[in-house]
Amino acid sequence: MDHAQATTTLEAVLAANPRDDGAWSMLGHLLRRAGKLDGAIACHRRGLEVAPENASIWSNLGNALVDAGRFDEALAAHAEALRLEPHSPAFLFNNAVALRKSGRFKETLAMIGRATAGGGATPELRWERALARLQIGDYVHGFADYEARRGLASYHGRPPSERTWNGGPLDGRTLFLFTEQGFGDAILAARYMPLVRERGGRVLYECHPELRRVLSGLGVDSVLQPGSPPPAFDVEASQMSLPGLFGTTLASVPPPVTLTIPDSSREKAAHRLGAREPGTLRVGIVWSGRVTFADNGRRATSLARFLRFAEVPGVRLYSLQKGPPEAELADSGVAGHLVTPLGPDLDDFADTAAMLEQLDLVIMTDSSVAHLAGSLGKPVWNLVQHVPYWIYGFSGDCTPWYPTMRLFRQGPDQDWEPVFARAADALREEVRRRAGQ
């Protein structure tokens, strides 16, 4: 039964019996899956009117409230579910997720400890523990748990095998390094290639076509298309397992990878950007990552917020945005006037890197371009959500992964407005600083 049929059936059930608490909660579950969170929350609350002691509805309500970013209410709902059924593995897990997403990492770890007391941790619990530990900088234990991702039902990478590499000497053996997750993750992990080569083996490197040119200087023996059957190899590892295999700590993060920018890309960038206007600051902007990324709705925002930077005297904006959100530029009426669209000229990440070389600063919400700019050593101001990608930690304005990156963080209210206000003030100060040089 598809979503529409299930919804129609439940509506019929509720028309016949408006006091069917299970139907209310199931309808809320379907609405949550469809992203209709206000309706989902209302349905769960209607179910609780009928059955206030139903712990499952309380937990479902908490899940919907988490998705809506209403964390205090979510945690209260999950607490009620656990009051009613304190030993339920599902309710303990849901509470742990809510705590982590609200930024309460110490409580998250305590809740996971409660869930695992007297038994082994499931892959789902280990994954939540990994994210909490990595966020607070406990890389030693965090990367050990990070491998649990390959046991998740949602994991779409290569399954674990008996030939998994342990990070030791290769002694001439062939290592297959496969990719997983997104473009930014591949750029992040590429910094480990010098350490891999030191292990003395042959390397088969799986690489997205969009990254092939910009990562062509890694010194690997063969570059493979993702998803294609690899040639014979002896051991294998995910690129995203490399930080753990090399025992990375906050104090031992390797420097970013050296990128390769072909002359053809540099010529394209020089032609597109033209001569520099004296006394101006060229600022690249990106307001969204890939829309297929599950958490993109939290980390992304709209072009409209970035237009305040065009109000700063001496600033010229250049859009590096790609994908469906690029349409916002055409719809805004400012393309070519207040914002120069570079997206149509970007065929791959090598082209983007060449454009970044010609810019003075990049201001963006988190996406793969942040990893690219950080790897180039360009000043990049990353405007990040309340609980961002784990490499950004949870406090402070810098990250050891990209020394030229400055972080502007949302508060617990998840409001973008003060983030952009601080960035606009900082941009005015940057213009004044450069003018005084």
Image: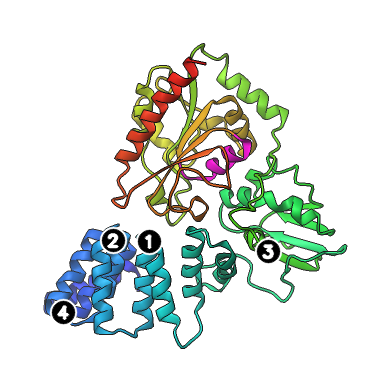
Could you say which disc has been placed on residue 2 in the image?
Answer: none
Q: Quadrant of residue 81?
A: bottom left
Residue at point 71% right, 32% down? Answer: 262
Residue at point 40% right, 80% down? Answer: 114
The chief SS type of the magenta part is helix
Q: Is residue 335 left or right of residue 241?
A: left
**Callout 3, which amino acid?**
Leu
Residues under numbered marks 3 and 2 in contact, where contact means CB atoms less than 8 Å apart: no
Q: Which residue is mark 1?
A: 101
**Callout 4, which amino acid?**
Pro
- Whole-angstrom CA distance, mark 3 to mark 2, is 35 Å
Q: Which residue is mark 3?
A: 245
**Callout 1, which amino acid?**
Lys
With respect to residue 141, does 217 lie above or below? Answer: above
Residue at point 82% right, 63% down? Answer: 174
**Callout 2, which amino acid?**
Phe
With respect to residue 51, does 168 lie above or below? Answer: above
Please state the horizontal and vertical placement of residue 254, each as a whole percent of the image.
Answer: 66, 49
Q: Residues within 10 Å of mark 1 (few under 14, many from 20)?
A: many
Q: Which residue is mark 2?
A: 71
